[in-house]
Amino acid sequence: MIVLFTDFGHRGPYVGQMRAVLHARAPGVPVVDLFRDAPTFDPRAAAYLLAAFCGEFAAGTVFLCVVDPGVGGDRPPLAVSADGRWFVGPGNGLFEVVARRAAQVEARCIDWRPSELSASFHGRDLFAPIAAGLARGQAPPAGVLDAAAWRRPDWPDDLARVIYIDDYGNVMTGIRAATLGPETLLIANGRRLKRARTFGDRPVGEAFWYENANGLAEIAVNQGNAAALLDLSLGDAVTVDGA
């Protein structure tokens, strides 16, 4: 299958235009919308989100990923193989965390260009055709790319910031819960939050943090909106106390 991961949002034509290219070039291949609202203009935050969610997909899956504020600039266009999955998109750090946590990684620079390539929509014109080809079993781009051209070794293994807020107001951090102990507190906007197993383990209206279904430390409120209650936004820092 082909999995879409973008910051395009739920309005506008952009995801539909990419899906049209995929349908034309890889008919019959299932296309799954994983995220349309990845952190806008923020490939670093998106990198931790992508790494948390990609593991549930089988080897052979192709991820078409576009969080690309530098589109048309000098970041390399990439096809990265990581533990049997392909990740196609901009070489701006978006695939750093996936690569860091994989046992086998190889990056290839996309040197193919379509006859018409817009300066501002490489997701449709460049990345979607490559993703469709990989999903159909075509050979990957030929040029192996040196790690220095696309890796981000200075980024932390876990990002102690807010990387996603869902429609319920639950606040995902870029911290893997497995790195934290049962007594660890998370401090967000001055509030000290205890760990819980799930929502019903806390009274209605109480804020806490827990390990979400994809392994991230997530701040929540039982039957409430954690982002609103704690006044949290994307990019806000979270402090770990007692990991």
Image (cartoon, rainbow, N blue to C red):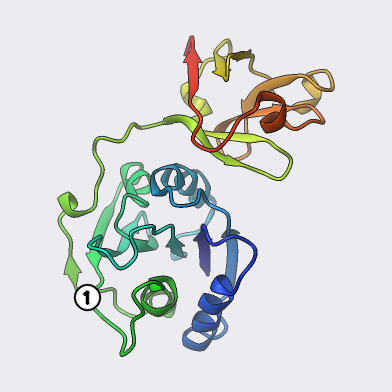
Residue at left offset 74%, top offset 32%:
225
Residue at left offset 38%, top offset 59%:
84
* Count of numbered labels shown in the rendering: 1
x, y percentage for residue 15? 56, 71
Question: Which residue matches tag 1?
Answer: 111
Q: Is residue 208 left or right of residue 135?
A: right
- On screen, 128 above or below 148? below
Q: Quadrant for residue 67, please give it.
A: bottom left
Is residue 75 visible in the rendered image? The answer is: yes
Q: Residue furthest right?
A: 204
Residue at left offset 32%, top offset 49%:
93
Is residue 174 visible in the rendered image? The answer is: no
Residue at left offset 52%, top offset 64%:
4
Q: Say which of 151 and 237 sits in front.
A: 237
- On screen, 156 above or below 47? above
Q: Say which of 124 and 146 sits in front.
A: 124
Q: Is residue 172 left or right of residue 145?
A: right
Circle 1: element type: loop
Q: Is residue 54 left or right of residue 103?
A: right
x, y percentage for residue 2? 51, 69
x, y percentage for residue 194? 64, 14
For mark 1, does the 10 Å Cα neighbourhood hold few (<14), some (14 to 19), or many (20 or more) residues? few
Please state which amino acid type lies under the numbered disc 1. Asp
x, y percentage for residue 80? 31, 60
